[in-house]
Amino acid sequence: MVNLMNEFFPYIWPKGRADIKSRIILSLIILIFAKILTVLIPYSYKWATDALVGENTTPPIIPIAVFTPIILIIAFGLGRILMVAFNQLRDVVFAKVGQNAVRQLASVSFSHLHNLSLRFHLDRRTGALNRVVERGIKGIENIVRLAILNTVPTIFEFIFVGLILLIQFDWRYLLVVTLTIISYSYFTIKYSSLRVVFRQKMNSHDEDANNKSLDSLLNYETVKHFNNEKIEEKRFDEAMAGYEQASIKTLTSLSFLNFGQTAIFTIGLTLCMVLSGLEVKAGDQTIGDFVLINALLMQLAIPLNFFGFIYREISQGLTDLNSLFSILKIEPEINDKKNAISMKFNKAEINFKDVSFSYDGKRKVLQNLNFNIPSGSSLAIVGPTGAGKSTISRLLFRFYDVTNGNILINGKDIQDISQVSLRKNIGIVPQDTVLFNDTVFYNLKYGKIGSSDKEIWKVAQQAQLSNLIKNFPDGMNTVVGERGLKLSGGEKQRVAIARTLLKNPPILILDEATSALDTLTEREIKQSLNELAEKRTTIIIAHRLSTVVEANKILVLDKGKIKEQGTHKQLLRKKGLYADMWSTQQTIKKAEATLKNVKPEYKKLLSS
Ligand code: ATP
């Protein structure tokens, strides 16, 4: 708890922000004024009541001639308006403190999440992670708002009321009120802690229902393909049934909490009123005193009413904040060395020296890889699915560190180079291109922020995209949909190629870069890709061997090991795995070509 306070204190009392600190002090001053006023207002009521029954209890400093009962009643109204004005002013002054804390924490969390490694993100559900951050941020907002703007003023008010009861009346009133508040708080805290369990259940069912709905909608097409709408509805409804049960318990227990709180408070209030009533009868108190005690206590009931809610929100806020801070404490797996160098290569020679890698420490995905890619040359990596081809590109980008061995660029271990400069020098056209839910233009420009429209159109043309863009409803300003789903696979791949052209890096990775394109477009794009690759060190990852024939060297990977390497011709001559894969693919290709020429009526016959 103390640790947590230390962690979030800098967000509320930020270093070097005199403006925020002075706002806190100013709002505390306003708060004290508002509370003094709150406690004094019932006095005008007392004086008015006494004046109405013919007794003058106004202090001598206030001339009674001016303060007739009516004016006292008006003063009561004005006092209340002023009190509300003070309270609102305090909120206005304080708003920036809370919102600044929210913004700082949100920004820190966001950049921290981007700093964390790929492994962390693959292990976590993005939706759940987002919720932890969202809740943590809401948590700090609630703590700031409710603790400082509500709990602190209520404590002040209680102290003021207590003093009045003791000085103006006697200790018995103070005792009754103190005991009432203690039992009220005890009951509220105990019962609210019980309710936390219901609430947690409600939240987890809510999360479950949310995840199911999100997952189901993301799989919209799969659901339709398999006609499984009913199953999806059932799964979602089951999750909602859990939520329903937990919500009913939460709501029912809230009613009991409200009843208990009101009962405790009313007992205390009634006791005080009985005491006062007896004293009025005995002539020791005026009717105004009776009214004053009632007004003071009724006023105190208002913030106390929220006590359960505030307690729950603050304790929930602390829990949420704790979860967020525990994520903020996670160290990124991949870190720059203290003396990491920033490199800009014009030419890049890549060396894999005895590289082994395992994602989980158990299964070796790459084993003792040794290969060299001279600057400006191309290396194709082929092999069965799951052989570890894409893993090589992830290691080169340093999303993971090698388990053994070294990866060198121009003789420098990539672990000695800063991640920013390393990644600046590598471009990739990935297997699955994911786009931002923004315009085509934005997604292209992402390759090099700050590039001109002319440059963007040029790369779009090189990637055979410009004609397609012209046919889009809003041209370059067409929004591509979530993850770019409104574009076809081939269109997305072209966007990826174009933005890599824009990035213009010395090292290029083409991970199945043309797999989603038709043969004609592939041929056209290949030309620009070849031009692009000419000056660069290029790694081509491919399934279709026809795309790697021209590579300077081909590496055949199987189960994480290099099985064969050489040029296309050398490998064919070897009559090994590559030659086998080549002849299988050629046979399939021939069969497909033959099928293309088959008359439609025969095609039907063949497929039946
Ligand atoms: P494909 O041709 O199908 O793209 P690939 O040769 O590129 O396959 P990789 O993506 O490099 O294969 O994966 C190699 C192996 O590592 C696979 O068995 C895969 O299941 C495993 N793998 C990939 N990513 C992870 C991960 N994040 N955690 C654990 N295992 C992984």
Image: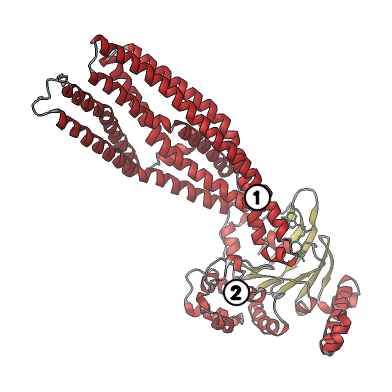
Q: Which residue is the extreme one toward the right?
A: 575
Q: Nearer the viewer, residue 540 or 584?
A: 584
Quarter occupied by residue 293: top left
Which part of the image, by quadrant, shows the C terminus?
bottom right
Q: Is residue 81 left or right of residue 438?
A: left
Q: Nearer the viewer, residue 66 or 308?
A: 66
Confirm whether residue 17 shows in the render. Answer: no
- Whether residue 578 is situated above or below residue 142 in the rendered picture: below
Q: Which residue is the extreme one toward the left?
A: 65
Where's residue 450, x and y in %? 47, 70
Where's residue 148, x and y in %? 39, 35
- Crowdedness of circle 1 by 10 Å Cα count: few (<14), some, many (20+)? few
Q: How many marks?
A: 2
Label 1, secondary structure: give it.
loop
Label 2, secondary structure: give it.
helix
Labels 1, 2: front one: 1
- Crowdedness of circle 2 by 10 Å Cα count: few (<14), some, many (20+)? many
Please state which amino acid type lies under the numbered disc 1.
Answer: Arg
Question: Which residue position is annotated with label 1?
Answer: 124
Q: Nearer the viewer, residue 12 or 125?
A: 125
Where's residue 426, x and y in %? 62, 66
Q: Which residue is the extreme one toward the top?
A: 282
Residue at 75%, 49% in the rendered image: 360
Give the label on residue 442, or none. Answer: none
Question: Which residue position is annotated with label 2?
Answer: 495
Mark 2, ligand 1, within 8 Å: the answer is no
Q: Ligand 1 is in which quadrant of the figure? A: bottom right
Q: Is residue 143 left or right of residue 335?
A: left
Quarter occupied by residue 38: top left
- Whether residue 334 is situated above or below residue 3 in the rendered picture: below
